[in-house]
Every structure is written in structure tokens, then in C-alpha cells.
Image: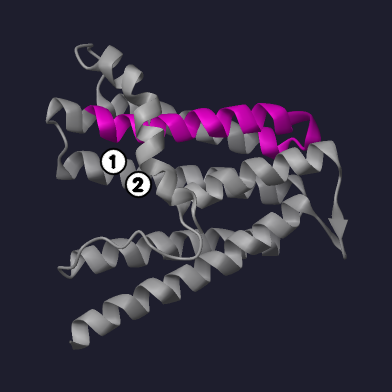
Amino acid sequence: MTFERLRPWSKKIIEPLVDMLEHSLITPNQISLLGLIIAILAGFSFYTGESGYIGGVVLIALSGILDLLDGELARRRGEDSNKGDLVDHVFDRYSDIAIIGGLAAGVGQYLVGFIAVTGVLMTSYVGTQIQAIGFSRDYTGLIVRADRFVLIILAVLIDISIKVTIGPFGAITWLLILVGVGGHITTVQRFNNAWREIKS
């Protein structure tokens, strides 16, 4: 999708925060940990159902800001490292599991949630595995992390405001289906891109 293209614009938005924290005692890893905690709280808010949706949206937006902030702060300070990258990716995956798992459990769609979580994890795994065999990390595909954040927020807001039901499912379940199918398609896309590079 297209939301990943907005990353340079979003980095400009958080630049004042980076300026403020550049000379502070707060470390990028501490920001990553805070982002994980907030993502887990977002997942729990979604799990509680409609009463927690607004809180979940606010928390997931804050988690997304922190996800950008940790890397930008590390680069500004010249502290970006393999250790920081490892922490960031591991925490990001736990955040994804918490948020998507919370959404799925909140609407009782455990099978759909399983498909969504595995799609997300495989998308990330293939991207890092491509990097592990010596190629550049692949962030492309049908649905990437920035897309998921935006789609989750939109689906939750739609579910709160107009209660759309298409066929047997509401907006949240259709979101999970989209994330799951899109994640597995993205996995195949990244695999194929790498396979062509390996053979060439």
C-alpha cells in the first residue's frame, strides 16, 4: 500500500521530539521498551471490546510515534547499532502480536487472528532473513507495518462510528482478514524478490 511512503513526512513531525531528547538521559532502548508497554496496553484495550476502542486507538498512535522516535534518536546521537536494531525488531514483533491478538480476542475471531498474526510475523521474518543472507532488508509489499497501523486505526474508528457489517463480519474482522491475507501475500512478494536476486 502507500502509507510507508509517508515515513519521511512523519519523521519531520517527530523532529522536535528528537531535538528535545537528544541531550537527555533517555536512551533509544528505553523508548523502545515504553513503546512495547504501550502496545501491550493497546492490545488489552482492544480486548476489552468497544469500551476500550478509543483508548486503544490513542495508545496505538502513541506506540507508532515511539516506534519512529527510538530509531531517529539513535541515529541523531550516532548510537544506532546491531544491538539496538535487535531490540527494536523483537519489541516490534511483540507489539504486533499484542495489538492484533487483542483485536482478534475482543471480537472472538481466534482463527482469523491466527492468520493475521502469522501473516505479520512471516512478513517480518522473510524481510530479516533476506538481510541475513547478505541482501538489503526488504520493506516493500502489499501491506507493511505503517499500513497496518493506519488500517487498524481506521477500522476501529469505523466500527465505533457507523457499525459497518459486510456479509457475516464487522469492520474489525474484515481488518484482520485483510492484514492476514495481505501479510502472507507480502511474504510471497518479498520471497520472490529475493529469489530472483539469488538466481541472478
Quadrant of the rendered structure where residue 83 is? Answer: top left
The magenta segment: 45-73
On residue 87, the disc is: 1
The reply to whether the magenta stretch includes residue 53 is yes
Closest to the observer, 45 or 59: 59
Q: Main secondary structure of the magenta part?
A: helix
Task: List the residue tagged with mark 2.
Answer: 90
Q: Which residue is drawn at 24% across and 44% down?
A: 85
Question: Can you say whether 158 is above or below 1 in the image?
Answer: above
Q: What element carries label 2?
A: helix
Packing grade of label 1 (10 A; few <14, some 14-19, many >=20) is: some
The reply to whether the magenta stretch includes residue 95 is no
Question: Can you say whether 120 is above or below 188 in the image?
Answer: above
* 39 left or right, relative to 169: left
Q: Position of residue 123 (x, y in %)?
A: 43, 63
Q: What residue type is labelled 1?
A: Val
Q: Which residue is drawn at 47% across and 35% down?
A: 64
Q: Where is residue 170 in the image (x, y as percent from the top left)?
A: 82, 54
Give the quarter of the figure containing the C terminus.
bottom left
* Disc 2 to disc 1: CB gap under 8 Å: yes
